[in-house]
Amino acid sequence: MTSAPQPPKLPMEYPISLRDVSKWYGEVIGVNQVTAGIAPGITGLLGPNGAGKSTLLKLITGQLRPGAGDIRVLGRDPWTDRTIFREVGFCPDSESFYDEMSGASRRIKGYSKGMRQRTKLAAALMHDPRVIVLDEPLNGLDPSGRMEMLRLFRELGAEGKTVLVSSHILHEIESLTRSIALIHHGRILAEGHISEIRALIENQPLTLQIASPQVREVGSHLAGLDCLVSLTYADNGHELIARTSTPEVIYDVLQQAVLDNRYTVTALTALDDNLDAIFSYLVKK
Amino acid sequence: MMLLNTIAASMRLARRHIISRRRWVVAVAIIIIPAILAFMASRRIPQERGEIYTWIVFLMIGGILIPYLAAFLGSSIVGDEIEGRTLVYLWTRPHGRHTIFLWEYLFVAIWIALVAAVAVALTFLLLYSALDVQGIGSNLRMAMWDMIALASGGAAYAAIAFLLSTFLKSPLTIMIVYIAADNGVQFMPGFLKLLFVRHYQLAMSSNPMTDSPEGFFKFLAENQTTPETAAISLAAIALTALIAGAVMLNKREYVKS
């Protein structure tokens, strides 16, 4: 007698594990067949607005029930086993509070957005949880508050706690962790070390905006390069738009030309070095 | 320790429903207004104390004020959390989804019972205080039964509202219709009235008008349900509604994506 092939086992050693998890809202899909394991330390969940980050975090914290698939937090099902919340802290992205509640000094109702964010974080961390799930925790914080929180998250990660942080801002996550998962349209597009993600997108054509008083000379200089995908002049007469799959070649060529006093470059901007461009590229790929 | 934390949190949340947003003013009005009306009426027609008592306690307090207070408070236990989007704070804590709400219901039911008891007691005192000790004593037992009937009815109304709020967006609208129908159905023949809280509430109460029925109150005298059966029925209604509500809370999703 032969037995049917067994599905791959859940990586139960992970504090948070998901296998083929999907969540539908009627005909709209929130999370689409996500399989992932979140290890101790900090993991960034990165995706543009509406990508499914919050839905995924709500599934992990047992607020939503998966339509399909299996979720385990510390080896237990968060929808049915409420005891996990002795060891799980959750900071939601919503701004809702009990109006009558007060913090250290006054009613939360009168708090600034930054103070509310800190209050939510304090509520998530006060019972010293092993697993910490933070939905856009840096929203609304001023730069010093942001630094303070990033330091706190790093400390928690260094203590061996499992910290899952969502954000739609790439550099925010990059400054926090090397371990990230990219989510878009409810799917995990890539997961792993930031360098692996970077490697995936390194051949993505990048759009550069170059400003120079000698824009025609710059254009004719770059036009001979093999790495150039397209070159267009802006209407203002002192800018050009170059698309290239290897921007570092352009950077080197421009830098050398400026050093050789062939022409002046007043500005060099990567127009689409942002999440949307990266995600669009990965989706097409 | 965990249980004590849950009870303490439930008390704080229940206090929010009862006292905050000037809701205590409503409770005070429910206690004072009927008593004042009863007092004024008794000054004009002192020989009709029994009838005034019936109209004020059974129709005003028991038929309108307490049911609507119970419906409002019962539906706000879950409804306020959904509306205020604060459910996330309760559901990421280590207790069952229904636990904190059931404790909250208990405190709300105690509050409704307290309001009903004080409202009846004040009305009774203002109506019968002119009588001698023997006169007060003979009517006191009646008032005690009425307090129990109104409190039990209030708890049942709150439980039904609690259940409706676990799966309806506007449970209060349904409750308003139900309570409005509640009074009318009692005068209809047949078994329909057995589905309504009011039937059991009236069966439990003393209702002096039905001791010697006149006019439309004679229908109430035909209420064959014994006070014991009525008490058990009200408890069964409340328990069934609470269990069904707890099941809904555990099965349904309330958090939006």
Image: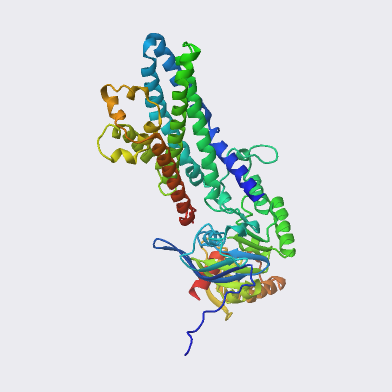
- Residue A12 on image: x %, y %: 61, 72
Vertical side of B126 occupied by A196: above or below: below
- Residue A259 on image: x %, y %: 72, 71
- Residue A256 on image: x %, y %: 69, 74
Front one among B195 and A55: B195
- Is residue A78 visible in the rendered image? The answer is yes
Asked where in the image residue B161 lies, by quadrant, the reply is top left
Residue shown at the point (50%, 37%) measured from the top left? B109
Front one among B90 and A24: B90
Front one among A201 and B58: B58
- Residue B128 on image: x %, y %: 46, 15
Q: Is residue B205 left or right of residue A196?
A: left
Residue shown at the point (61%, 47%) measured from the top left? B6
Q: Look at the image and name its color scheme.
A: rainbow
Asked where in the image residue B162 lies, by quadrant, the reply is top left
Vertical side of A282 occupied by B186: above or below: above
Residue reaching furthest to the bottom: A1
Residue shown at the point (67%, 37%) measured from the top left? A106
- Is residue A266 visible in the rendered image? The answer is no
Q: Is residue A197 left or right of residue B43?
A: right
